[in-house]
Amino acid sequence: MYAVLGDIEFDLISYWDGMEQRAGSDYAEHGRIGGKPVLQFVGDKLDEIRIDLVLHAAYCQPDAELQRLQSARQQHQALALVLGNGDHKGMFVITDLTSTGRQTDSNGNLIAVEAQLSLREFGGQPALGARPGLLGSVSGLAQAKLTQLAPGAGLKPNLSGLTEAVSKVKSLTVKARAVVNDVRELRDLARRDPLSAMARAPKALDDLDVAAPGLADGVGRLKEFIQPYAHLAETIKPLVQPLQDTADKLGRLAQTMRGCTQDNVAGKLEEGAAIIQDIDKDWANRDLTLAKLAARTAVRRILE
């Protein structure tokens, strides 16, 4: 998942074709008698972003995708733009949507479309840090009041930790995908050159031994926010079981690769092929759900 705009996800492989960003500053010009005018800084301009898209019937429904974008524009709402790495670019409105049909079928249905989406920074939102009940705040209670809580009453886990937990899980899923790809390449290499595959196998096994328990620990951190905060449950629960399953499968893959020798490395990697296929099946759903959670966390909408 490359980015999320509001609830609209953009996939780098599917149809993201580029992003152009424009930023600037405004200066007032003051004329002077007998001399050159001078400039005075007024303020920064609103950021502008143009996203180039290529929609093709081979991987999406061009008409439906265009309609989703058009609907978002017509709502006239500021939307959060968050990259897949969790980088919150800010709040933007859709100012223009241009599309050019490049290919249709005999009935006029769109097969290939090029589209340009123009975004402009929305400068009217309140400062995120000033809103009560946001991540990182203590619900507006004075620190002194916290010390007056009855002993044993207990405190809910600090919601500022949710951002850290989401970031950790995202990082670990990226590493998990990378090591799965490495093992897949090793399997192909072992068919041709078992000796070279054997030389690379220990590094892949070490990576699996880090990714599997790390991902399981990240899932445990996310689960800490479900019970105390019921309103977070429907956002986090869909992630828990799929990510835990992935961690378990990574552990099984690591177990399969243990004890590799030059004679058996090809066979062991073939045994792991079914596990890799299982892990691969649901990457898209996992990435989408995690990206949406990252987006909601980044703009502090998760507590609303």
Image (spheres, rainbow, N blue to C red):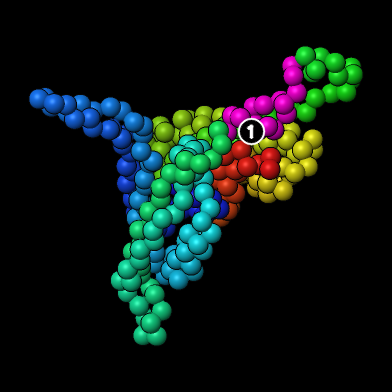
Q: Is residue 102 part of the magenta span, yes or no?
A: no
Where residue 198 sits: x, y (%)?
A: 43, 35
Residue 239: horizontal and vertical position, in percent? 65, 46
Residue at horizontal 63 percent and vertical 42 percent from the top: 301
Residue 80, image x and y in percent? 51, 45
Find the residue positioned furthest to the bottom: 107
User: Along the line of sight, which residue is nearer the eye, 140 or 175?
Assistant: 140
Q: Is mark 1 on a helix, strand or loop?
A: loop
Residue placed under numbered mark 1 in the picture = 131
**What amino acid does circle 1 point to?**
Arg
Relative placement, left or right, of 206 versus 32 is: right
Q: Is residue 213 left or right of residue 229?
A: left
Front in this rendered view, residue 271 or 240: 240
Residue at position x 72%, y 48% in the image: 234
Task: Specify start and end residues of the magenta stretch as a single range.
Answer: 128-143
Could you say which quadrant of the image residue 216 lies in? Answer: top right
Does the magenta stretch mainly form a helix, a strand or a loop? loop
